[in-house]
Image (tube, grey):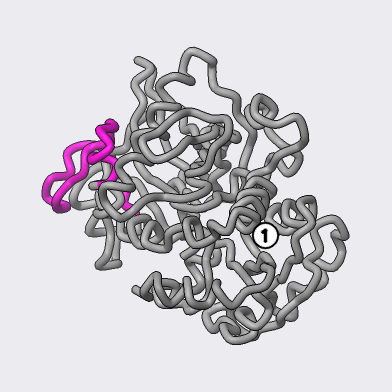
Amino acid sequence: MLAREKIEEILSNYEDFSIATICSHSSLQIFKGAKDEGIKTIGIVRKDRRKVYESMPLAKPDEFIEVDSYAELPRKALVEKNAIIIPHGSFVEYTGKAFDDLAVPIYGNRASILWERERNKMLSWIRKAGIKTPRLMDSPEEIDRPCMIKFPGARGGRGYTIVKSRKEFYDRVKEDDYIIQEFIIGVRAYPHYFFSPFEGPGYKTEKGRIELLGVDRRVESSADEIARAHSIGIRRNMGFTVIGNESMVLRESLLPEYMEIGKKISDASFELFGGLTGPFCVETIINEDMDIYAFEVSARIVAGTNIYPNGSPYSAYYYREPMSVGRRIARELKTAAKNKTLNEIVY
């Protein structure tokens, strides 16, 4: 992984900074939030997608950099433009392992993306935090109940499947890199946290504070329509590709436990890899006994935050003005630049 000192050297030559990201995933929210905070924006875009972003004036980047492939980023041009990259799910997926050594300042601790990307590391992180997780099977031979088969990377659920026996596993799964996780029936809830090491409102952690800026649930291809399909005689396997997101408000009695979940994930991140900075999401499921299980951590902004470009039912308790996660990122960077502490939250 690229040495932190290299990024600090690059940052030391920035007179000002701009916010850049790939035009995908949550970029509209990121661009709008930066513009709301008066920060210049740069959209890295494929030519065939540019007109979408040009059509939305309040989220249109101030400048575009056209590329043929998101896998090959214009590193030199971004540094020359004093860019700080905001990573999101598509950014992580498109750049792959090249992300680790990308010689451009990135908001947050890039080591956290490595822990998200490698699922065994991610699950050890959740366990380190002391949060309940679904049982993980060591091999297909252990499958004795419904299990979800997951694959590495920020795929948005694409390709995931449920199997109920080892025979089903061998019939359906053709990839070599996967995890086998117990499938728990319940309600899925995706809380959007934001960690800051600086002073301000929020739930205290060992190294700073966290804010709860929203909650969503995911709409997943055929998984959300399977009952309707069965009612008219269609039988098919469930698909879990994320198509969109819906707003969710947790019953208030769950908030103490959810704030502790965010705190524990944050505290464990500092013990394991030097800390998780900025937005993150702990993907959870609540069963009928009100037990909460965490099954994934997304160590960056998640697409579910796109529901709230003008703030959520939770951000209203922290800020008097509309505060999306995109705007919250921009404000954090602006505050750090003013206080000459960008090196604490950019790597």
Q: Where in the figure is residue 314, as x and y percent of width and height?
A: 63, 28
- 70 relative position to 45: left or right: left
Q: Is residue 213 above or below residue 70?
A: above
Identify the residue under disc 1: 27
Q: Residue at x 59, y 78 (%)?
A: 13
**Which amino acid type corresponds to the residue marked 1 in the rendered image?**
Ser
Q: Where in the figure is residue 119, as x and y percent of width and height?
A: 30, 55
- 45 relative position to 217: left or right: right
Q: Image quadrant for the N terminus?
A: bottom left
Q: Residue at x 48, y 65 (%)?
A: 92
Question: Magenta region: which residues?
Answer: 125-150
Quarter location, residue 35: bottom right
**Count of all numbered marks drawn on residues in the image:** 1
Quarter location, residue 201: top right
* The stretch drawn in magenta includes residue 183: no
Q: Residue at x 68, y 33 (%)?
A: 312
* Viewer-side residue, 311 vs 345: 345
Q: Where in the figure is residue 44, as x and y percent of width and height?
A: 67, 74
Residue 327 in sight from this viewpoint:
yes
* Viewer-side residue, 135 vs 24: 24
Q: Residue at x 53, y 57 (%)?
A: 341
Extreme residue toward the front, this view: 339
Dot 1 alpha-carbon crowd within 10 angstroms: few under 14, some 14 to 19, many 20 or more: many
Q: Is residue 237 above or below residue 3?
A: above
Residue 232 in sight from this viewpoint:
no
* The stretch drawn in magenta includes residue 126: yes
* Viewer-side residue, 104 vs 229: 104
Q: Where in the figure is residue 88, as x and y percent of width and height?
A: 55, 59
